[in-house]
Each structure stands twice: as structure tokens, then as C-alpha cells.
Amino acid sequence: MAGQPLKVLIVEDVEDDALLIVRELRRGGYDPLPTRVETAPAMQAALGDCSSFDLVISDYTLPHFSGSAALELFNSCGCDLPFIMVSGTIGEETAVRLLKAGAHDFILKSNFARLVPAVERELREVAVRRARRLAEARLRESEERYALAAQGANDGLWDWDLRSGCVYYSPRWKSMLGYAGDEIGDGIEEWFSRVHEEDRPAVQARLQAHLSGSTAHFESEHRMRNHRNELLWMLTRGLAVRDEARQPYRIAGSQTDITERKLAEERLRFQALHDALTGLPNRTLFMERLHCALAGAGGCRFAVMLVDLDRYKIITDSFGHNVGDALVLAIARALKLRIGPRDTVARLGGDEFALLVEGLSSADAAIAFARDFQASLAGPLAIDGHEIFTSASIGIVMGPGDYATPEEMLRDADTANQRAKAQGKGRCQVFDTTMHTFAVNLLGLETDLRRALERGELELYYQPLVNLASGEIESFEALMRWRHPERGLVPPTEFIPVAEDTGLIVPIGRWALQEACRQISAWQAQFPQRRPKVSVNVSAVQFAQPDLAEAVLQSLATARLEARYLKLEITESVLMDGSDAVRAMLERLQGEQIEFLMDDFGTGYSSLSYLHRFPLDILKIDASFVRRMDVEARHDEIVQAIVALARSLNMTVVAEGLETVTTLARLRELNVAFGQGFLFSRPLDAESAGRLLASGRRWNGARGSHESSAG
């Protein structure tokens, strides 16, 4: 087996003597790689690269060169290698002189057995010397680096001598707190007295834990007061130095100003838990506070309210998102004014807000709170130069009750909110358990409605509009019905709000428009002498679609129906947006000879000024006024006022909800042009409406009698 490689420079004139050295080294377990020289130039050339050798062995007596000269030459080269002198006869005095001159050992040729132990010893010692020099160099480098770091670092440095109690604070440590070098002493109280009183116990506990050996190092983030009594966040780190008994006698470390980092973290935490637009708590923070309210209620009642703005999407579509954002901010401010310091108002997203109001002991108290807020929205809001009318639907759930999680409470508040919306604008509703069942059924209804159109379950019913002067059918209003395979005929009051909330009203509305145009075109071909018109309801959701005009014109073209035979019924909510886009849509379609009816006039909350601003053709008086004309004078007066208003604006009037001959006679006295109601006919399916049209029925006379003139 090969031994340890050993590169050895042998200064020897006798080759056999050199071989003896090599053989002895091999016996000692080395694998020598010898280089033999016998002159000074050769030796000097060989030592030109000290790393080429591990060891130098020189004979003392050389014919052209002496051992003393070889040692001198070796010293001049500065090689850190063992130099061992070998001699056949050397006196003690000479040996001492050589050792003083730098030789590491001398071996008599008669005692070669000492060679290997001497080599081993000297190789170890040279390794130790080299390691020591490397450590010393690194220490010097470290000390220089520390000195440079202390001078150039942004951190403050501190060094606490635990035995004397003195603490060194670097100039930077002091300046971080706004002090000059002579304004801070060397006591530990200079540090601890400036730590915030709430943080001081934790800092001292962490420091003691490290000094006792419980933690590997000391680290603490805490607040400190500067010379202006301002609070700064500091990160302090330290490491103790211990004696042989593992007892600390010194601890030193650094101090870093992390105020900016802490402020950034605080901003991130705020952003993570608050709404960017309003600064209100977001859903995450609201749910955390609701969880705490449930956990710590202790029998104390509180209310959770879900507030949803009515018509928010229409407002943003009409006026833009800047106005929508300004409206959200106004609502946020109004809600904050109504809550106490322990309450929470949050923005969950869009136009949806949630409130956690403590101290409301009953549902009546919660309803009063909600109605007070709703009352504040009764008038127009001035937003970016616009008068914005809005209202809020509010769902209320009382806690803690049997609720185990905040998610359950918010779910039920949302269910109550949806019920409030279904009852009309600006309503509030307190949750009860029957609503959950209703919500589940409503979800099923939505699922079925999505399939109803493709399955052909939707159909149109037609209710005639009668010319009150001639008694003839002038047109039909197309009314949508849903023939559910299991539930039978579903009234529109149940599924139309679902369709509007889900956006399904857009494809359903287009189908209704196409089908109505097709049916009227077919009746005109069948009864050319009648040529009835048709009015189709268009919701605010549909009116917000930018391609509505194209859809209307395409339906007419497909059915080959002239545009003058189509009327579109809209509610006041469409006009409430007051946007140029709405006006442009109206004018474009009117330019095609399509007429517009304002449905349910008198029940809304818009300013009458909208009638001057928008080009409308027909006012349809709401049935709630017409039905009670002959029993309440007040309603008769309202109808008179609407008729007068329409006449002043050159608008035609339609009275819906006409059910008695007395009402019919009164409407004729007022010269109302058209009537619609059960007195004439209930809504009919297409086949029955066709038969009514074929009969040529007319409603004449004060008693509403009718006659037939088929043909």
C-alpha cells in the first residue's frame, strides 16, 4: 500500500546516501518524491517555488557546498519548511550553532532511526505554525473589518461588560436617538430607560433568557423614545461571551432602526384588512370582529346588517365609475356617523356594506336604526355635479342567538337583504328561519330559469290596450310567463327579479322581443285590416346593454315588422340615471319610429324634470291610482293631474288597471286615449289573443258593453 506522499529536497553529493534517506522514509510510512541537488545554484533554483516541497534534508559535508551554506541559502529563500541536517560526524557545538541558525533538527547517519520521528514532528510543527499564521491573519482581517463596519455601518453598536456594569454605546447608537456623544453615559439605564414602558418587560425578559443560556442569542423588536420623545422602532441583537463555567461576562450587539419597515408593515396590515377606497374594514376584518362578538357576547345582543345600494350598477354604467366611487364614499361617511366607538362598519365590495352594531336589544331597535339611515337617503345626493337618487336595501340578523360562526350570520343577513330587495327599493328585513328555506328554493328557481329558455318553457301572454274613443283594440302588451314542468305557471313577480339579479333578463328579454315581433307580424298578415301594435317591457338592466338598439332593430328585421308597430315600455328607473347614453338610445330608436312608454308613472321618486329632458311618447298611469278612482277622490285628482301633465308635454296617456265601467266612463270624460285592464281582458296566451283579435270585439258605451264585427 502506498504511503503518505512526501516531496523532499535532498542536498547530497553521494547518491547512495540519498537513497538511504529515501529508504528510511519509506520504512516510516512515507512515499517520498525526492529531488537531489549538490550545488548552491541547483538548490536555489529548486527553492524558487517553496510549495514544490514539504521538507529539506541536507548533508553537512559537501565537496563543493557546505551544510552551513545550504542552511543560509534556505533561510534567504523564506520557505516555511522543515530543514533537517544529516551528518556522519558532527560535534555538539556545531549542532547548537546550526539549530540557532535555523535548522530544525540534526540526525547522525549512525542513528537514522531518528529520521522518521524527526520528520513527523517537524511536519506537525510547520502545520501548526501555518495554521496559527492563518488564524492571526484572519483575526487581523476581522478586526479591520469590524473597525470599518463600526465606522461605516448604519447600525449602532453596544458592548456591555457584565462584571463592571459599564456599557459602550457607539456614536451611531447615540445619534440614532438624536443624542450627541457626551449626552449619553455608560450605564445600562441609558438603554432601558428609553425603551417604551409597554415593551420594557419583554426586552428585559428576552435579554435574561439569553444570559441564562435559554436562547442561543438575544433579539428584540421594540419601541424607543428619541430626544424629541418620538417613538422609533428598533431591532436589537446581541451575543453573550461566556467563561469556562459557561457564565456570561460580556454581551455585545447591534441596534438597527426599523421604523420605516414597521410603518410599511403597518401599511400592509392596514391594506390587508381595510378597503382601499373608503378606508373602512374589509370583509376579513369584519369577520374577525364578528367572531369576537360571537365569542364574547355573554348574552348581550347585537345586530349584523347587510346594506346594499339600489341601482348602483345603473348609476356607474350611466355616470361612470368616478361617480360610483364618490357615491360609495358618501354612503361610507353616512354610515360611520351612525355607529358608536365599539361598532363596526365595513365595505364588503362594490356597493355592499356590513354593520356590526352592539347594544341593540331587539329587532325593533335594529329596524329603527336601519330606517333612520334609509331616511337620510330620501333626498338627492350631490355627487360630482350630478343629482343622484339612491336607496338602500338592508338585511338584518340578530345575534348571538344560536349562531356558531360569523359566516352563518353573514349568510342569513344576506338572505334577509335579498328578501328586502324582492319587496322593493329602500326596504329592510329581519331574518327569520323561513327565509333560509326560501333562499334555497330561490336558488333552485334560478337554476331552473337558466334552462327554461333553451327548453322552451317561456311563453308570452298578451293583454289588449283599447282605444277608449273607438272601443277597438289598438295594441297588446306582451307579458312573459314561465310554464314550469313541475310548478306550473310561475308568476313574473317571482322569476323576473331573479332574472334581473342574475343578468338572465338580457337573453330572456331578447327572446321576448323577438317572439313579440314575430307574433304581431303573423297577426298583421292574418288580420290585415287590424294591424295591431305591440309593447314590450325593457328593464333597466337591458337598457344598460350597449347593443340594445341593434337587438331591437334585428328583431324587427327578422320578423319583417315595421318599427312603428313596436313600442318599448320602460320604468322611471331607466331615466333616473340621466345619462347621455340613455338619451342617445331613446333618440336613435325613436328615429326609427319606435315609441316609448313610461310604465307605472306616479309610483316612482324621480323629479318630473326628467320628462322634459328625455323624449318620451306615452305615459302609462299606474294601476294603483286607476283602480281606486271611483272610491277615493284623491286618486281621481292624481289621475287628472297626470293627464294634464301629459297633455302639456304632448304625450299620450294609457290607464292600466281599468276594472269597472265607472272608471271607464270617468277616463273617457278626462279624454284618456287608451285603457288596459280586466274590464277588457285578462292577459291571454297567443292562441286566445288571436281569437279575441279575430272576433273584432269593440267596447262601446258608458256601461262598457261590447260588440263584435268579425271580418
Image (cartoon, rainbow, N blue to C red):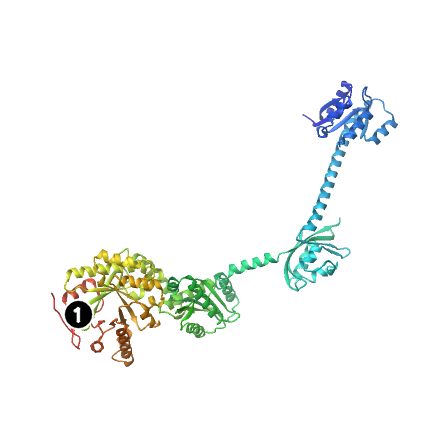
Q: How many marks?
A: 1
In this rendered view, identify the residue nearer to me: 331 or 340: 331
Three-letter code for the amino acid on which mark 1 is drawn? Glu
Name the outermost residue toward the bottom: 633
Q: Is mark 1 on a helix, strand or loop?
A: loop
Image spot of residue 301 (x, y percent): 49, 71
- In percent of width and height, residue 376 lies at 43, 73
Position of 463 with respect to 308 (left or right) is left
* Towards the viewer: 41 or 361: 41
Left or right, 708 with respect to 259, comes to left
The residue positioned farthest toward the right in the image shown:
93
Could you say which quadrant of the image residue 185 lies in? bottom right
From the image, tell me which residue sits under label 1.
Answer: 472
- Of 298 and 442, which appears nearest the observer? 442
Residue 125 percent across, percent down from the top left: 76, 34
Seen at 76% across and 18% down, the residue is: 15
